Each structure stands twice: as C-alpha cells, then as structure tokens.
Image (cartoon, rainbow, N blue to C red):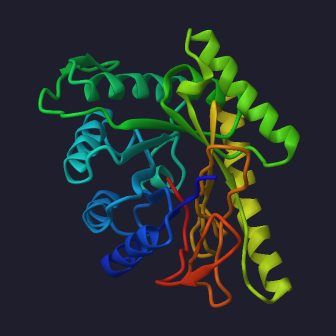
Amino acid sequence: MEVGFFFWPYEPPLALRMAELADRYGYAMIGIADTPGNAMDPWVAATLVAQATRHARVALCVTNIESRHPAVAAAAIASLDLIAPGRTVLGIGAGHSGTHNLGLRRSPVGDVAEAVGFIKTLLRGEPAVCRGGGEAHLPWVRRPSKVFLAASGPRTLAAAGAVADGAFVNFGLTRENLAQSEGTVAQGAASAGRGSAAVEIWQIAALDCNADGDAARRKIGAILAFMAAGYTWDRAISAGAGCRRRCTRQSARCGSATAPGRARPMRRSSPSLACSITSPNGLPCAVRPINAAHSCCGRGPRASNA
C-alpha cells in the first residue's frame, strides 16, 4: 500500500514541517491544496515542499483551469519538476474553493478533460492549441509530469480514464464503491484505446484520530458534508458524478463558506484504505501505511481544496 496526504498551506513553516514528516514517515505523495483566500499560494508552498523533500512525490492537489490558464499551470509544474525531478504531479479539478473564493465558475467536465490533454501535450515539449486561444509551446520542458484529474462522478471518472495519467477519486470506499469508480475509470480508458494500468487511482477517505469519539464524529460529519456538496454540485453542472489503485485523504475545517469540514489525501497501489486524519487538538497527523504510528505537527486546516 502506498500512502500520501495533502494539506492547506497556511504558512511556510507548516509547509516545511509537512515536507519533513512526509519523508520521515515514508509517505509516497504530499499534496498542496489550491485555496485562495484561505491559504498561501500553492505554487510557492509546493516549491518549499519540493526543496525540502527527497523521496515523496509533490502534487498540486488540486488546482483548476479558471484561476490560471492551463498553459500557465503546465509551465508551473514543469518548473517544479526542475526542483524535484520525476516527483511532480499536477492535479486538475473543476474548482471548489479555488474558484468559488475568487468569484469564478466551476468548469464543465468536457473543458477540464480538454485542458488535461492540452497540458499533457505541452509537457511532452510539443506545441498545443487550447480552445479559443493561440498556440502555446514549452520547448524547455525536460520530462513530462503526471497530470491527474479530480473525479467524483461518472463523467469525470470516465474522463480521467480517457485522458489523464491518474485520478483523485472521491466516490466512496465500500467494495461496491471501489468497483464502480475503478470500473468507470477503466471503461473510460478502454473507450480511448488505453489500458487501465495506465491510470493511477487515489481514493479519498476520511478519518479523525481524536480520542474523543463525539468530537471525531462531528469532524467526520463535516468532512462528509463537504464531500457531498462537491458531488451535488458536480451533478448539477455536468449531469454526472483505476487501473492501479491509489488513496487520497483530505483535511478541511469549519470557517470557509465553501467547506465546513476537514479533509486530506492518501494513495494506494493495491487494495487499501486512505483517510483524512487530524489529531485531538486539531493538528494534522502523519500516519504510517502499516499500523497507525503517527506524529502531530503544524496548524490544522480550516478551509477546502480547489
């Protein structure tokens, strides 16, 4: 099982502490949320994390195509890869607090899928044309970073299978949920003539490690409300809701108009579980893949992801 997490980058010391813990406890991936109005710029935080880690992959988990042009995001992740060669992942989503807090729209599934293809072309060092725009080209790119799609419904899951290198899946963790989400990604891959093994899947779950059961349940309820809100909105705008497996866990906290909860990501390469974890005092915990050894650090997240 491979495990990772993402966090809200409130300040540089937190980003550096999370980076140190990621490598110390053997996390496979550390992600940085894009949530303007709630935390510092994700690319600045990602640069700090990339410089401070030696082993963990560094992911934007996730950004969007509304607040930054897809070509700008492609150039940013390629630049980050110069600092952390072969360890970078660009996560793209329809938008949550990353768009809402700026007064921007959420992107339709088709637009996001098209942007993923556009970004992947640029990251191969090839020129590409984005819908409604001119040609972009990043000839200085040394290697293509992985591009993941955030998916919480049938259409985004299928799109991830068809065009992305991986998927951050927020669909549920029962046996039936996993079979359905991963099956939909596989179908999307097959429809595009791709093998399902080409797509990494990271499943999102939620866990609170507070010793006070009532407090833990309250926070888990907030996480679930946050996740459910994303599902409802996705279906409203798109009429809809991998593969080697991965898990994500996400962590948020009351205080944002867009996310009344806690959440954070984990990943897996064989059947496993990923969770959002917070400590009794609200601080994020690092949890090892085997058993539940953990260490608390930093300041707890209070908002939502992109």
Residue 57, given in percent of the width and then of the height, sits at 40, 53
Return the residue found at the far front. 290
Residue 123, given in percent of the width and then of the height, sits at 27, 29
Return the residue found at the far left. 140
Figure quadrant of residue 171: top right
Identify the residue shown where x is 65% and y is 66%: 276
Identify the residue shown where x is 26% and y is 20%: 133
Give the number of callouts.
0
Name above or below for residue 153 compared with residue 129. below
Residue 291, given in percent of the width and then of the height, sits at 71, 71
Name above or below for residue 300 compared with residue 248. below
Identify the residue shown where x is 41% and y is 58%: 56
Q: Residue 237 vs residue 86: left or right? A: right
Res 240 visible:
no
Figure quadrant of residue 197: top right
Residue 81, given in percent of the width and then of the height, sits at 25, 46
Identify the residue shown where x is 35% and y is 23%: 118
Res 5 visible:
yes
Along the line of sight, which residue is nearer the eye, 77 or 96? 77
Figure quadrant of residue 201: top right
Q: Residue 234 vs residue 9: left or right? A: right
Along the line of sight, which residue is nearer the eye, 242 or 27? 27
Q: Residue 176 vs residue 29: left or right? A: right
